Amino acid sequence: MVIVIGATGFIGMYTVKAFLAAGKKVIATGRNEVLGKKLVSMGAEFIKLDITNKNDFNKLPTDDVEGIILLAGLLPANAKADLDKNENAEEYFKVNVQGTINVLEYCRKNGIKKVISNCSYSDVSGAWGKKYPITEDEPRNFKFTGDHAVYVISKNAANDVMEYYNQQHHMQCAWFRFPPVYGVGPHGTIYVNGKAHKSGIATFIDSAQAGAPIEIWGNPHIKRDIIYVKDAADAYVLALASPKTYGLYNMTGHIQVDLEDQVKAVVEVFGGNKKSEIVYRPEKPNSTPSFLYSMDKAKRDFGFEPQYTDYLTMMKDYKMELESGFWSELVKAGEKTN
C-alpha cells in the first residue's frame, strides 16, 4: 500500500494515477473533497487530511504501508499574501516544516521507513546561468527577498529535518528537486506576491487558439530545464521501489527549452488557421537565466529516464489530455481571483 499525501494537488493527481497503473493500492489524502471524489473514481481510497493537524494522522493505516509520497505544501503560486503589506512566513513554516514533521512522526511511530517529497529548484538559483549541469552537490545559493524566499527557506528546513530522520531514526527519506513541471492542471492563474495573474503557459495557449500575437520578453533564446508531469509521477513510482533511493535528487526532463522554440511549439499545436505572430520585446525584463540540472543520480539509483524529452511532444500530449476532459476538475481547482 502507498499513501500519497497531498494527492489533490497537480503532481499528486498524476502520481496517484501512476501508482494505480503500477498495480499498487493507493490511499490518497488531501483537503479538496471534489478532487477526492475524482481520485476515488480513479480507483484510490480518499481520506481528508490536513498535514498541520496531528490528530488527522489517526485516520491513516498503521500496517502494510510501503511508503509515503509527501506532496502537500504551501507554494508561492497559491499564497495570497502581498508582501508589501503582509507577511506569511509563519504559514510557510506551519505547513511545510511542521506538516513534514507530523508526517515523519506518523512514519516513525508506525515503522514506515520510506518518505519521498520535493524541494524548491530555486535553492540553487545562484548557479543559474552557469555553463554546466547543476548536480545535487551544488551548494545552496538563493535570494532572501521576494515571494519565493521564505518558501525556499521552509522547504530547505523540511528537507533538513528529513535528513535528520534518516540519520537519527534510520529512515529512507528522499526529496526531488523539480524544475518547472508542465502538464494539464490547476495553473490557469497563479499568485505573484499575492496578486492573481494568468500563467505564462495559459497566456500562450489562449493567444495561439485566438491567433493573437504572442510576445517574447527579453532574450528569446534563454534555455530552461523543464519536466513533464507524467515523467514526474513515474519517478515517484520508480524511486519508492528502489532500495537505493536516499536524499536529494534532481528530477528533470534533462532538456533545455529555448523560449522561442517553446512559443513556436504552442502555436503549432494549439493554433488554428490563423497563426499567431511572435512579437519580440527585448527591452522587456526576463530575469531568469538559462539553467540545466543533472539527472545522473536518479538514473543511477532507480533507473529514471524521462519519456517526454522535447517540448513539441509535451504540448501534443498536453492538448490530448486537455481535450479529453479527464482533468477538468483539477483545472477548475486552479481558478484564482484577487
Image: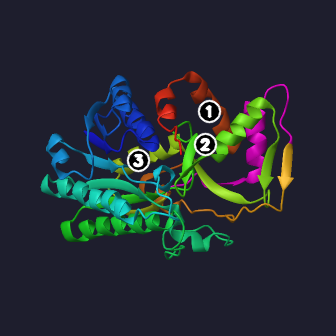
Give above or below for 89 relative to 321: below
According to the image, label 2 marks what residue?
A: 308
According to the image, label 3 marks what residue?
A: 236
Look at label 3 and name its amino acid. Tyr
Residue 83, percent across and down?
50, 64
Instruction: Tell me the quarter of the picture where residue 127 sits.
Output: bottom right
Residue 141, percent across and down?
53, 76
Q: Is residue 184 left or right of residue 257?
A: left
In the rendered image, is residue 99 in sight? Answer: yes
The mark that comes first in sequence, 3 or 1, is 3
State the residue at coordinates (34%, 47%): 241
Residue that lies at the very extreme toward the front in this rendered image = 85
According to the image, label 1 marks what residue?
A: 317
Q: Residues within 10 Å of mark 3 (few under 14, many from 20)?
A: many
Q: Residues within 10 Å of mark 2 (few under 14, many from 20)?
A: some
Find numbered disc 1 in the image and state the secondary structure of the residue it sits on: helix
The mark that comes first in sequence, 2 or 3, is 3
Q: CA distance from mark 3 to mark 1?
A: 20 Å
Which stretch is magenta? 251-277
Look at label 2 and name its amino acid. Tyr
- Locate the N terminus and report the quarter of the image it occupies: top left
Q: Are marks 2 and 1 in contact (CB under 8 Å)?
A: yes
Look at label 1 and name its amino acid. Asp
Q: Are marks 3 and 1 in contact (CB under 8 Å)?
A: no
Give above or below for 334 relative to 195: above
State the residue at coordinates (73%, 46%): 262
Find numbered disc 2 in the image and state the secondary structure of the residue it sits on: loop
Find numbered disc 3 in the image and state the secondary structure of the residue it sits on: helix
